[in-house]
Amino acid sequence: MSNLQDIMNGLPLRPTTFTNRRKRKVLLMGKSGSGKTSMRSIIFANYIARDTRRLGATIDVEHSHVRFLGNLVLNLWDCGGQEAFMENYFASQRDNIFRNVEVLIYVFDVESRELDKDMHYYQSCLEAILQNSPEAKIFCLIHKMDLVQEDERELIFHEREEDLKRLSKPLSCTCFRTSIWDETLYKAWSSIVYLLIPNVQQLESNLQQFAEIIDADEVLLFERATFLVISHCQRKSQRDVHRFEKISNIIKQFKLSCSKLAASFQSMEVKNSAFAAFIDVFTSNTYVMVIMSDPSIPSAATLINIKNARKHFEKLEKITDNPMVT
């Protein structure tokens, strides 16, 4: 569609009301050995699952500042889960640890033999959050689900989820089942980070319009460093509810393979008789994936449309980064 750039340029770019404080404090907590540092290393430090075995236990609190989507910084506090550290967090470090928290991620080892103690520490976290950061979003990850027999996973997860939701009141929590060995880790972290992205509704609205203009079945945006799905629109239903996260995992592994071979990952195309999928650099902080099922649309036309839409989404991203831009 030759005039796509003109159409996209005609879409409104409204400045966001997001405040100037773009550093978001995220607490990552849970008992020692629950898998906190492994998941953090896979998502943010380009580890692959088998390499996390060499990671040691976290001592006290490990701080990291993760730049995400350009100007959004995740101030990630990975809190060591040894008993002495946990007790210290609730005593002498209580205000420091739990003040100004935007997200608490509490990780439970599904095979823990000390479930009562896990729940006790989780409740202590909730009490501290309620006192210091009552607006914080709470996420519980039931982790290492790959160790549970596949036919029992659904039942065990829902039992834990019910217990945690009841225990969390008056706060509310969102639960995910996770494993470093499959797409569930990407699903959980994409959902968590999504809540921290400013102006995300406008981004999704523009993505929907872009999909309609080029007649795409689906369009997905991936954050460039992590390959977490940050936005998507879907115009045709699909059977596999986990396909986004599977794609994230596959493409990130492909990107890592390219880097080990000293090759640069820019784009790829997968095509068969039923559909075509295009993954390409989009903005300075994102990749885009476009899925088409109309065989009459040439690949070259889709690639040109992606190129023509870049300038518009770059402008939108700058508004997200700097709310003073008009």
Image (cartoon, rainbow, N blue to C red):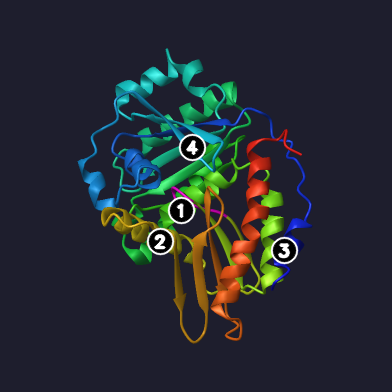
Left or right position of 200 against 97: right
Q: Element at badge 3?
A: helix
Q: Which residue is mark 4?
A: 67
Q: Amino acid at mark 1?
A: Phe
Among the two numbered marks 4 and 3 on one chain, the one whose residue lies closer to the N terminus: 4
Give the quarter of the image for residue 99.
top right
Q: Which residue is mark 1?
A: 227
**Residue at image point 44% right, 53% down:** 186
Q: Residues within 10 Å of mark 3 (few under 14, many from 20)?
A: some
Instruction: State how far apart marks 1 and 2 are (Cα).
Output: 8 Å
Q: Which residue is mark 3?
A: 209
Q: Magenta segment, principal secondary structure?
A: loop
Instruction: State how far apart marks 3 and 1 are (Cα).
Output: 23 Å
Q: Position of residue 170 (x, y in %)?
A: 62, 34
Q: Amino acid at mark 3?
A: Gln
Among the two numbered marks 2 and 3 on one chain, the one whose residue lies closer to the N terminus: 3
Instruction: State how far apart marks 2 and 4 are (Cα).
Output: 20 Å
Q: Between residues 84 and 1, which one lies in front from this camera angle?
A: 1
Q: Amino acid at mark 4?
A: Arg
Circle 1/circle 2 CB separation < 8 Å: yes
Looking at the image, the residue that sits furthest to the top is 92
Q: Which residue is mark 2?
A: 251
Q: Residues within 10 Å of mark 2 (few under 14, many from 20)?
A: some
Q: Element at badge 2?
A: helix
Q: Report the span colored magenta.
A: 224-230
**Residue at image point 41% right, 20% down:** 89
Q: Is residue 226 magenta?
A: yes
Circle 2/circle 3 CB separation < 8 Å: no
Give the quarter of the image for residue 264.
bottom left
